[in-house]
Image (tube, rainbow, N blue to C red):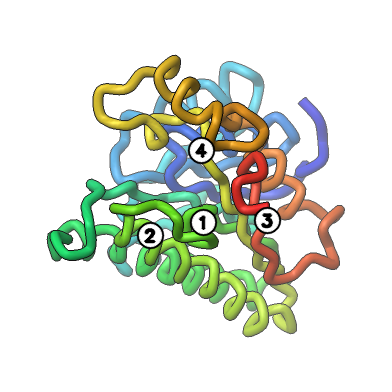
Amino acid sequence: MTDRFGGKVVLVTGAGSGIGRASALAFAREGATVVAAARGSEGIKETVALIEAAGGTASAVVADVSKADEVANLIRTTVEQHGGLHIAHNNAGVFPKPGPVGDTDLEVWQRAIDINLTGLLLSLKYEIQYMRDNGGGAIVNTSSNIGAHGRRPGMAAYAASKAAASTLTRVAALDHIKDGIRINAVSPGATDTSMSLRPGEDADGRAERLASVVPIGRVGGTDEIVSAVLWLASDEAAFVVGHDLVADGGVTA
């Protein structure tokens, strides 16, 4: 345990697994009080248990980020339980079923937009409303390198939602830096989570597939992505505003 984020209340959405869980654990290890949020309770309860077992402080709040009333309640509950909100990692997202644009199912498209984009907008809206009246804060959004390069056939819904998420990050950052709120994004490449596995693929198969695709020759670790999130959220990045930090092993280089 360290004290890098001592005295800070940190909200992490999509905290039930993958990058979100790793983020929640990392913030807690560095002294933060963490609120772990997701649409389902099972994963975030496990995340909180892991934090508490390591000596940290955390709570779980169920919230669907695509629903305005649930996001508003998430922020309200965070403040009521812990006395404030200083940092948010907006990580909630979905990876929709792939398919070519000409065969895109409107429900698949809409789900990606609802969670990955509208969910981000709502998270930002209610976080900003609290932070601008309470001394500012730092927000880090999880986007994707696919939104930056777009070279993934069959991923129109995901790529479009993440490209928009990166743009929304930049606009929000400029809108609210004078309110004392720093907003940035991290855009991971293929990371060691279930999202990066193709149907029927295991970790070894993924490693073999990506060895010749990713210049660094491997998949990224969740800890490597989270280290970028924590840096952007920290005072060490105090002059960084509206940046999209791509961590993808050189794919977009």
Secondary structure at badge 2 equals helix
- The answer to whether 44 is drawn above or below residue 152 in the figure is above
Mark 1 or mark 4: which is in front?
4
Query: Which residue corresponds to the image point at 64% horizontal and 37% vertical from the top-left?
Result: 215
Badge 2 or badge 4: first in the primary sequence = 2
Q: Residues within 10 Å of mark 4 (few under 14, many from 20)?
A: many
Left or right: where 156 falls relative to 219: left
Q: Which of the marked residues, 1 or 3, is nearer the chain's N terminus?
A: 1
Of labels 3 and 4, earlier in sequence is: 4
Amino acid type, label 2: Asn
Q: Which residue is mark 1?
A: 143
* Three-letter code for the amino acid on which mark 3 is drawn: Leu
The picture places residue 24, in percent across and down from the top left corner, at 57, 37
Foreground tag (2 vs 4): 4
Using the image as rendered, state which of residue 5 and residue 144 is in the foreground.
144
- Residue found at x 40% / y 60%: 159
Residue at the spot 32% in from the left edge and 22% down from the top edge:
201
| Sooner in the amino-acid sequence: mark 2 or mark 3 | 2
CA separation in Å, label 2 and label 4: 17 Å
Q: Which mark is residue 245?
A: 3
Residue drawn at (49%, 50%) of the image: 91
Q: Earlier in the sequence, mark 2 or mark 1?
A: 2
Q: x%, y% of residue 228? A: 70, 45
Name the foreground residue: 64 vs 150: 150
What is the three-letter code of the residue carrying label 4? Ala
Residue assigned mark 2: 116
Q: CA distance from mark 2 to mark 3?
A: 18 Å
* Residue denoted by label 4: 190
Q: Is residue 22 visible?
A: yes
Residue 26 in the image: state x and y as whole percent.
66, 33
Using the rendered view, name the quadrant where residue 158 is placed: bottom left
The reply to whether the C-beta atoms of the residues labelled 1 and 3 are less than 8 Å apart is no
